Image (cartoon, rainbow, N blue to C red):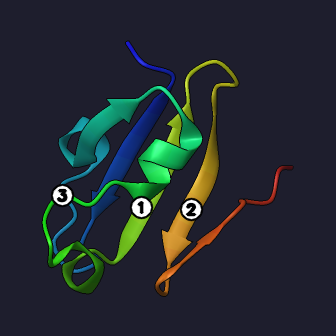
Amino acid sequence: MKRFMLFSGDDYYPWGGMEDFKKSFDSLELAMEYKENKEDEDCIDWKHIFDIKENKIVKEYNRKKWETPQQF
């Protein structure tokens, strides 16, 4: 298993859990650059990148931009 797992979906029809899993990557940068198809930016409302080594979400994508989630 690669270190970074990408989950993404549509706000209107999210599948939930592992059903939203797209692909795993060796680097955070590759996960952030991944597009499932050329319309990806228009049809995907959210993305989360989960780092299995750190056991947390390290990047969140909404409103067409990437952010680092706040840690509690």
**Residue 19 screen position, x and y as percent:** 18, 42
Q: Position of residue 29 (x, y in %)?
A: 55, 47
According to the picture, the residue beneath numbered tag 2 turns out to be 60
- Disc number lying in front (2 or 3): 3
N-terminal label among 1 and 3: 3
- The residue sitting at 41% across, 31% down in the picture is 25
Local secondary structure at mark 3? loop
Is 67 left or right of 10, judged from the image as shown? right
Residue 70 position, x and y percent, is: 80, 59
Asked if labels 2 and 1 touch by Cβ distance under 8 angstroms, the answer is yes
Tell me which corner region of the image, top left, top right, bottom left or bottom right, holds residue 40. bottom left
Tell me the CA gap for discs 2 and 3: 17 Å
Q: Pick the residue in front: 38 or 64.
A: 38
Judge by depth and name the residue closer to the eye, 48 or 42: 42
Report if the CB atoms under discs 2 and 3 are less than 8 Å apart: no
Residue 47 circle label: 1
Q: Which quadrant does the N terminus fall into? A: top left
Q: Which mark is residue 36?
A: 3
Q: Position of residue 21 (x, y in %)?
A: 27, 41
